[in-house]
Image (tube, grey):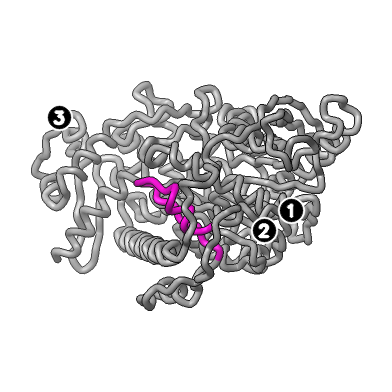
Amino acid sequence: MKKFLKYLSLGLLSTVCTATPGLGADRISFYYPPFGEFSLPVNSLETFAKEGKIDEDLSFYASRATPEQLAQLRDLLQQRFNVTPTLVSQVTYSPVGEQLMKRLGELLLTESRQNGFYAIRAALILAAVDKDGLTVLNLLRRFPSNTMRVNFTEGLRIVDDLSQLLETRDQVVAFLQKEAIAQAAISTVDFSQQLDLRSPGKFRWDIKSLELNDITRNRRMPVDLYLPIATPQSTPTKSSPPFPVMVISHGVASDRSTFVYLAKHLASYGFAVAVLEHPGSNAERFEQYFSGLAGPPEAQEFIDRPLDIKFLLDELQRIEKVDPNLQGKLNFQQVGAIGHSFGGYTVLTLAGAKLNFDQLRQDCDSNNSSLNISLVLQCQAIELLPLNYQLKDDRIKVVIAINPVNSAILGESGVSQIKVPVMLVTGSQDIFAPPVPEQIRPFTWLSNLNKYLVLIENATHFTAIDEPTVENNVLPVPPALLGPDRTAAYSYINALSVAFLETHLLNRPEYRPYLQPSYARFISKEPLNLSIFQSLPIDQLNQIWNGSTPQEVKPSNPQPVSAPP
């Protein structure tokens, strides 16, 4: 009974906290056999939210929650969500929104114990229209049923699945941290005496803005080109053009401001950096969608994004031949690509990863109740015709994928097709593209020996990206999801990107020591601890994934590391 009540209070809190779309009308009802039915009047929550008083009905549950949980609950009940009725309608009537509402409706039932999908959607829209706006309490009052019933069995299953998912993640991260310490211990390099790759390079740079138009696909793409300027202070081997070319691909609802810090840093090291916007999934498109001026992003975006970058490279090659300011400045024999989230998927396909429709059908089955949020995005691709899409671009010699989504859309057979050097960057607290299924396991699928996994502990899905400007902040991210101060993460991405590109794109082996665990530990700062791996002990990781305790860690790459000349 004690365990049941613990779960009951957890279920109440997690339901309120995670299901901002709606709860009940006059009462919230829980049924858990063999103990029977428990219920809570909505008035009790309203009194608690407005006055902080816990009445007799709420005390049964409140006594089983901590003061911190109660404070969080009250804050949430008082929170007003600034969304328009148009936005709510657009999202909840979209294919992705309907899928989410139906899943939520399996947990939050109507009085007649039916899936609460339609009731939740109606309550969301009505609450958003109300003069008091969308609040949890207003939502409760707008739910079109006298009683909202919580499917407690389903709730417990979700809690158990989530607990297991987080426990496995934490075990994997802890194990990898020990592995990194063991590998770093064999290094003899004193990085305090070496070039600090976190600092800007010697090149000045200019920004050239372009507006590209692919008329065959009706896609207009704004591009910012960060072009180095050769100076006497430049390093002897890179004092003059042509400069190697890097392309940066943003994530969903973002734009070309996402990685300004990285574009400037790479330009200072002599890389010409082209940062584009994907018109089908950028911030502007989502703003139009939320305003009711455009439909939801389409599955075709999985194909159009890599084609955008192909078109960008084609256009740069064309313009470079006729524009006096660009002639002889760009080296198309040395091209790399960097992408974040959906952009991470984009650059992996350009590197040779193939779409995996068999994996998609398996992972996107309607009975699949995975807690991997990135599947909401990936499963849109099921609408595509299952063809052999030719997305690889042979001009791209290296890629860096930051928080990529790929487990279903690419899968093991798709990722294993990549033959160029790859760096995957993951954050241990990423709940949108979870580290184990979306980066750590896919890293083990890569067949190229020149591969790297960068782990930033306590980093979220948003840690590596620039703070959006107010006008471009289409999807405001709650501070709790941003994680710790991102400054250290920016320096990590800057330094490791330079080391990776110098080593594998420009073939300068003197930069390889910077890609070792010892360098990651040298620049690592709490709480965003940094680790880097070129290989992982897959047998020991499999033990964790299968619920076993791994054996004692032994360095998986014990070769000594030499200092750069």
Residue 386 visible in the current orientation: yes
Span highlighted in magenta in the image: 515-534
| Up-down relation of residue 273 to residue 175 (above or below) | above
> Who comes first in sequence, dot 3 or dot 2?
3
**Circle 1: residue type:** Lys
Depth check: 524 or 558 in front? 558
Disc 1, disc 3: CB below 8 Å? Answer: no
SS for callout 3: helix
Q: What residue do we see at 57% from left, 61% from top?
A: 407
CA–CA distance between discs 3 and 2? 59 Å
In the rendered structure, the answer to whether residue 150 lies left or right of residue 233 reads left
Asked if the magenta segment contains residue 528, the reply would be yes
Could you say which quadrant of the image residue 164 lies in?
bottom left
SS for callout 2: loop
Q: Quadrant of the N terminus?
A: bottom left
> Who comes first in sequence, dot 1 or dot 3?
3
In the rendered structure, the answer to whether residue 38 lies left or right of residue 437 reads left
- Local crowd size for mark 1, using a 10 Å CA cut-off: few (<14), some (14–19), many (≥20): many
Instruction: Measuring from the top left, give residue 252's x and y in whole percent.
Output: 59, 41
**Circle 2: residue type:** Pro
CA–CA distance between discs 1 and 3? 62 Å
Instruction: Measuring from the top left, give residue 454's x and y in whole percent.
Output: 51, 55
**Circle 3: residue type:** Glu
Disc 1, disc 2: CB below 8 Å? Answer: yes
Q: What residue do we see at 37% from left, 26% from top?
A: 133
CA–CA distance between discs 1 and 2? 7 Å
Give the residue pinned by disc 2. 421
Residue 397 disc label: 1
